[in-house]
Image (spheres, rainbow, N blue to C red):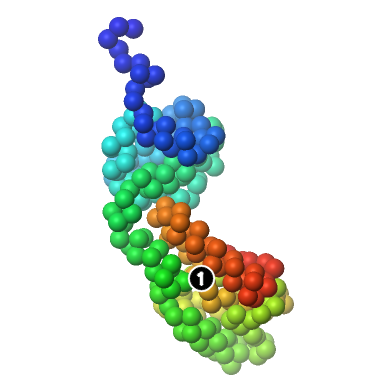
Amino acid sequence: MDGMIQLDDMDCEFKEEILSRVPGANLDLCFTCGTCTGGCPASEQFGMDPRKFLRMLLLGMDDEVKQSPWAWVCTMCARCKTVCPMEIDIPKMIYNVRGSWPREKRPKGILGSCDQHIRTGNAMGVPSEDFAWTVEDVAEEIRNEHPGFENLQASVDRVGAVMALNQNSREPVTEPDEMGPLLKILHIAGVDWTYPTVMWGGENYCMFLADDEGWRYITEEFVYHIEHNLGCKVVINTE
Ligand code: SF4
Ligand code: SF4
């Protein structure tokens, strides 16, 4: 029709960029049912929700999409993708929006935690020897004060253990007792396990930062250590 803007005429550069990075993404199939928005914990934050965000992207509102702080309040829970009748991968779209931000402009808290993890092996910056000390301290307290667990063992970097277990680094610092229940479960189950001291933090702020390189570096260092140095066959990611 004369005078009307046709969708095909609209400039959707950022959408095309995302489609080039996410092969098979089916963003155009959205029929605005709103199911994604209904279960999204980030809906209405900054006046935004996943359906609206996707519509803006499809309509070529590139600057608004790229600059919206909403991309950073998404939890990456993937509820939206799970319930979407068209299986649209909204978290991956949001991940790419985050990746379009200059690294230094991304939220300081997430950025700092990612950098800390790359530098020290965990987001809290806990030295490996302090982590090892805390693990043994928690185990000793359980042995001494919890009847039935007198023989509980918790090791760090034990070569030949079948299973490697990572650990959210906040617990050894702020709530070391919270580590106890898992140690007890592993003991009762008779699991042959150990904590690694390389990249032992189970959290993954580089993923939330959309820092592919940092994420890859952390994962590769972790895998190399448990495979080549410890010989573990199984990994349990506790996060
Ligand atoms: S659930 Fe899927 S189809 Fe429905 S509005 Fe959300 S993205 Fe679009
Ligand atoms: S992944 Fe993000 S957009 Fe999707 S439901 Fe979770 S918080 Fe909402």
| Above or below for 143 versus 110 | below
Spot occupied by residue 174 in the image (x, y as percentages of width and height):
41, 77
Task: Examine the rendered structure and indicate whether residue 166 appears above or below residue 216.
Answer: below
- Disc 1 marks which residue? 199
The vertical placement of 4 against 107, above or below, is above
Task: Judge whether residue 55 can be spotted in this image.
Answer: no
Evaluate whether residue 211 shows in this view.
Answer: yes
Residue at 59% x, 68% y: name it. 224
Answer above or below: position of 25 versus 143.
above
**Location of residue 11 (image quadrant):** top left
Rendering coords of residue 96 (x, y %):
42, 44
> Where does the image place residue 192, in percent across and percent down from the top left?
70, 77
User: Image point 46% across, 28% down: which residue?
Assistant: 28
Check disc 1 and give the amino acid type: Met
Of residue 98 and residue 171, the one placed in the foreground of this image is 98
Residue 75 drawn at (x, y percent): 42, 52
